[in-house]
Amino acid sequence: MSSRDHLAEWRAARLPQAQPLDDTNRRWLEHTHPSQWTNPTPDGRYNLVVIGGGTAGLVTAAGAAGLGAKVAIIERDLLGGDCLNVGCVPSKALIRSARAIGDVRGAGAFGVRVPDGVTVDFPRVMARMRELRAAISPHDSAARFRQLGVDVFLGEGRFTSPTTVEVDGRTLTFARACVATGARASAPPIPGLDDAGYLTNETVFSLTALPRRLAVIGAGPIGCELAQAFARFGSEVSLIEMMPRPLPNEDPDAAALVQRALVADGIRVLCGSKDLRVGRDSDGKRLTLEVNGATQEVVVDEILVGVGRAPNVDGLGLEAAGVAYDRSGVTVNDFLQTSAPHIYAAGDIASRYKFTHAADALARVVIQNALFFGRRRASALTIPWCTYTDPEVAHVGLYPKDAEAQGVAIDTYTIEHAKGDRAILDGETEGFLKVYTRKGKDTIVGATLVARHAGEMISEMTLAMKAGAGLGTLAATIHPYPTQAEIFKKAGDAYSRTRLTPGVKRLFETVLKWRR
């Protein structure tokens, strides 16, 4: 298939998901998959060929080219991947609008009256999201990467041997390659769901009208974030989760706080659901399920599936390259090598950490290991993450269950935001910090933070872990007053108090009496 044929076929398939096709979306598409793009002619052997133009692929290609490597990148869909196009960027734009709504509705507690209440202009909310996405898209654009010295190919890339990839009727020969094709939304096998129709994170951002009634299936990070946002926009939201609580992989106390916040925003939270079925009638889309032994019915206008991901391995010709994969993605070792040692993989296709910042970090491992005989290990990375509900839940390192599984004895230090002056002044006392250290030591092995801006704050704990700085160092670190980040110092103080044993206290008392 020629590049022109590919572009025509791609646009016919993709444009229905890129609605409305206004000037803003046209600018976004022209950056991420330009309509008049001409693929280059391969010239000799590449040091590195990257398949996939999401975060992992783009960082790998840009970093390698910046170091002098001859690099090609292949993308069949949108440069920028999930993050720019249907993930982090559009979702956080909506979450920011939703947070503004929450602030206005809660303004009375601060002595600020809003006499006319809140009026949500949902089309404008979505237009703002599209404008911001288009404004950010040049950073991931085909033109920018060409300027960086990367050969950019738009089309279906497929391995034809352990050292060649075919795209657009051209054969690219390489010394090293990186598979960075990511993952896609995949709905669970719920009876009647396909016939009723549903949204995913890949289609929800094309909405121009607010659904009056919305069911969100899956109370993981995506489900909780978007359920809360749409509830604040004015939808009647039902959040359906098979597990006993939202955010089932998170700290139970953190999940309980998020659940209270979701309920406070008017969301009907249906956890522990079983036997979910979907039908359609004149009233709308009807979901029938069992919760705590009782049958429940939810009738909605739209269904958003916020759970399920499938790796993008189809059509890559991995067998021809000798690259092993399974239902979870491409198999890699700790150096991110596949079963073909000269071929690497990074990002969602090969990692349990499905985060943009993790893909970025893993791409840097690939650059060093693939091009410079490095031996950097993915397991050595300290990767935090955050769920952007209100309040946010951020975590880094081990949970207690992980520590127990690894045979690591821990101490836990818990600090409530209600004890922090700035949190009290901000009216944001719901939340806490839990720090997990090795038993009897100040060595930090993990931390969970629930706070309105937990994602902004958790990096202090990540840096401490990366640098090997313990709670004693945090106790000695001066924080501006008043800030919510003082909670880290309070955790350090809590550790310091454990060192004041009865024997040490008696010694201090003796010395102080002598010095009177």
Image (cartoon, rainbow, N blue to C red):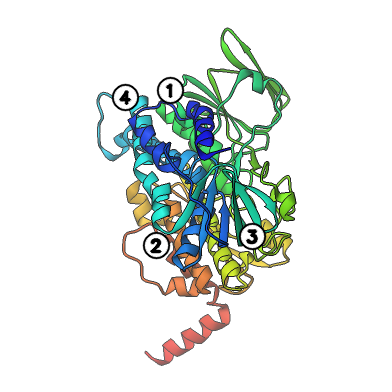
Q: Is residue 83 found left or right of 307 in the rendered image?
A: left
Q: CA distance from mark 2 to mark 4?
A: 36 Å
Tell which circle, 3 or 4, labels the residue nearer the N-terminal end: 4
Residue appearing at x 30%, y 25% in the figure: 117
Residue 270: where, in percent of width, then height? Answer: 61, 29
Q: Secondary structure at mark 3?
A: strand
Residue appearing at x 67%, y 59% in the figure: 163
Q: Is residue 207 found left or right of 114 in the rendered image?
A: right
Quarter of the picture holding the N terminus? top right
What's under tag 1, amino acid-wise? Leu
Which residue position holds label 4?
119
Which residue position holds label 1?
210
Q: Secondary structure at mark 2?
A: helix
Q: CA distance from mark 3 to mark 1?
A: 43 Å
Q: Secondary structure at mark 4?
A: loop
Which residue position holds label 2?
486
Residue 66: where, in percent of width, then height? Answer: 44, 65
Tell which circle, 2 or 1, labels the residue nearer the N-terminal end: 1
Residue appearing at x 41%, y 58% in the figure: 148
Q: Secondary structure at mark 1?
A: loop
Callout 1 environment at 10 Å: few (<14), some (14 to 19), or many (20+)?
some
Which residue position holds label 3?
344
Residue 29: where, in percent of width, then height? Answer: 42, 37
What's under tag 2, amino acid-wise? Glu
Tell which tag, 3 or 1, sits nearer the viewer.
Answer: 3
Residue 69: where, in percent of width, then height? Answer: 50, 66
What's under tag 4, amino acid-wise? Thr
What's under tag 3, amino acid-wise? Tyr
Callout 4 environment at 10 Å: few (<14), some (14 to 19), or many (20+)?
few
Tell which circle, 2 or 3, labels the residue nearer the N-terminal end: 3
